[in-house]
Image (tube, grey):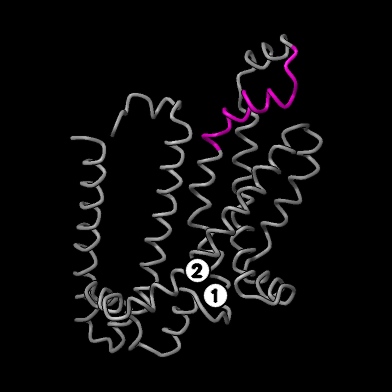
Amino acid sequence: MGGRSRRAATIAATLLLVLGVWYPLAGLMDASGDELASSKLPYPHSVVRPVLENPGTLFDAAWATLSTALLGFVVGGAIGIVLSVVMAQARWIEAATLPYLLLAQMMPLIALVPLIRSIVKSDSLTRLLMAAFVTFFIVTLSALRGLKDYAPAADELFRAYDIGRLKRLRHLRFPSAMPYIFSGLKLAAPLSLVGAIVVELMNARSGLGFLMLSALTFGPAQAPMLWAAMLVTLAMGLALSRAVGIAERLLTPWQMRFRGEGGR
């Protein structure tokens, strides 16, 4: 069985397992006599119904979230890579910068959202900035670790030939850091959606977070829409992480784990 066939079989088996657990649990909840059972854990087919009946609503909300989160992911990733390159140039730069990065990440997102919104006066820009904020820290640390993890013997050889700092960075340190950078990007991609949705949950006018909040506001009758929005968010997060994995395979085929895979 080829690599693609194995992945397809794994996805299908996981989906069947989730449904095999979800349906009995929903049935037990429904049989408990709880009047709100259908809102606490609806049946899977009840969750799928809003997707089929209101595809435009979910698509518009998903696009509002995804477009700004994706742009924020790109901006945050770029800032993180540039910052990691600067920090990797000297230990004193890293020592002077890292504590402030850690302090910034200790600030709760829910406290940052009203502050940023009051400054930029835009829900879309606030979503973008929060997605970038969540992304850049993860990418910075991942890239910094990769830039420091290179072969000392190769670095000595470059120095012996009097190769400059920029060329050593381009041909030695940066290629060595690529697996670390992509690992950080895989983690940051779905989290950028979380950053955008946190903004939408706080009185935004569009997006999946706004849809979730609206469903909660209208009570148990809209619970399937709430679950549908959460599942769409989950699917988008998995798709973004998978897209980063595909980009890594295309851009760094020289990695040992990609060699010999051919068309798989």
Label whose residue precedes the other's in the sequence (1 or 2)? 2
Query: Residue, x 64% and y 28% (percent of image)?
Result: 170
| Magenta span includes 166 | yes
Q: Quadrant of the C terminus?
A: top left
Q: Is residue 23 above or below residue 141?
A: below
Query: Residue, x 21% and y 74% (percent of image)?
Result: 45
The percent coordinates of residue 69 (x first, y second) are 54, 62
* Residue 148 image-quadrant placement: top right
Q: Is residue 250 above or below residue 28?
A: above
Between the residue at mark 1 and the residue at mark 2, the CA separation in whole angstroms equals 8 Å
Q: Is residue 103 above or below residue 111?
A: above
Determine whether the residue tagged by mark 1 lies in a helix, strand or loop.
helix
Q: Quadrant of the N terminus?
A: top left
Q: Main secondary structure of the magenta part?
A: helix
- Disc 2 designates what residue? 65
Label 2 environment density (alpha carbons within 10 Å; few <14, some 14–19, many ≥20): many
Question: What count of labels does the image hold?
Answer: 2
- Please state which amino acid type lies under the numbered disc 1: Glu
The percent coordinates of residue 185 (x first, y second) are 53, 46
* Residue 199 image-quadrant placement: bottom right
Q: Are marks 1 and 2 in contact (CB under 8 Å)?
A: yes
| Magenta span includes 264 | no
Q: Which residues are magenta?
A: 162-180
The percent coordinates of residue 139 (x first, y second) are 60, 46
The percent coordinates of residue 171 (x first, y second) are 62, 24
